[in-house]
Image (tube, rainbow, N blue to C red):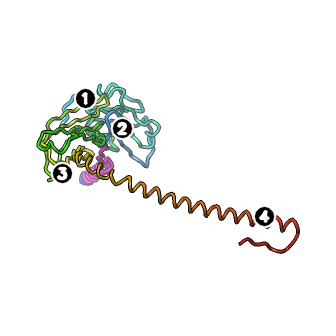
Amino acid sequence: MNGRGASGFDGMDCYGFLLLFLHILRAVTALEKIISKPGDNVTLSCIYPGREFSLDNLRVYWQIADDEDTEPCSVVHALISGQDNESLQCSQFKNRTQLLWDKLGDGNFSLLLFNVRKSDERTYQCVVMQTIEYTRVIHQEQVVLSLAASYSQPILSGPIRNSNNTGEEVTFICRSDNGYPEPNVYWINRTDNTRLSQSGFNITQHPNGTYSVLSTLKVKATSDMQIECFIENKILQENTSANYTDKSRQINDSSTGSHKDPAKSGQGAQAAAVVSVVILMAFLTVLICWLQRRRSSQLVSYTGNEALYLCD
């Protein structure tokens, strides 16, 4: 009898481990990466579809899940038995979080985070627990939040010089705005594809957290300068650039072309005038013939004569 009891206990123990294993499989931890612009509102996703839930039996915890985190407070948002519990919430998230109340019953436990800032660049974990008979974890997700914003197309300005000051030191300025995070700036000499070292760098942060950058380059002038400025945003894997070509060459090219333009313009105007005259004459010919046909048709209708009068 004791043997049967032991056997039954082992069977129940195995069954319990099986249930625990199934719960672990259901509480799968997913990892999602989200990129937001500083100052924007972002949705941290946590969805457990296919079921309906009673809020009275739910606990939803959003917490900081960074491995290296040593802060005493890690609770971003807490929902217990259908009510927000602000007493557990970290101070830096007060009045900045909100659950999607109309979607909670359908298994959407996503969190709205308002006015994101640099300190919000963390890994977050959503833990959903159900309290029926006993408390158990039914769903988990992790979300990595990064901040990024595209930099504007760079504006590159350089010296306006004549062809006689080759060898003198000249300055180039490259500017780009409203990006995040701080970018990498590269200067390239396109005549031989060598990288140049910037002479100065200035960065300004705006109230919304984005940056404007101003980089300067000082080099010796050459007769065929071709300079390119690159702005690199590593998080977005974006590269924007602006080019400078020796202004003296551009001025010479444009002045050379201006001597040829009047003759070409005169020939074009003459051709346009000839075409206009031809079109006008054709139009008048068609109009006269149409009027004659119409007049002849009216005469035939008036006299009742069935003879046809044709105008060649």
Residue 132 x %, y %: 39, 40
Mark 3 vs 4: CB contact within 8 A: no
For badge 3, the amino acid type reads Arg
Counting labels gives: 4
State which tag comes first along the sequence, 1 or 4: 1
Residue 198, image quadrant? top left
In this view of the protein, can residue 8 be seen by the observer? no
Foreground: disc 3 or disc 2: 3
State which tag comes first along the sequence, 3 or 4: 3
- Could you give the CA–CA distance between mark 1 and mark 4, rounded to whole angstroms? 99 Å
What secondary structure is found at the residue carrying circle 3? loop
Q: Residue 5 or 81: which is nearer the viewer?
A: 81
Foreground: disc 2 or disc 1: 2
Foreground: disc 4 or disc 2: 4
Which residue lies under the disc numbered 2? 42
> Which region of the structure is painted magenta?
5-34
Which residue lies under the disc numbered 4? 295
For badge 1, the amino acid type reads Cys
Foreground: disc 1 or disc 4: 4
Magenta highlight: main SS: helix
Which residue lies under the disc numbered 3? 190
Left or right, 295 with reference to 159: right
State which tag comes first along the sequence, 4 or 2: 2
- Which residue does the image show at 12% across and 40% down from the upper left? 168
- Could you give the CA–CA distance between mark 3 and mark 2, rounded to whole angstroms? 41 Å
- Which residue does the image show at 36% across and 35% down from the upper left? 40
Foreground: disc 3 or disc 1: 3
State which tag comes first along the sequence, 3 or 1: 1
What secondary structure is found at the residue carrying circle 1? loop
Foreground: disc 3 or disc 4: 4
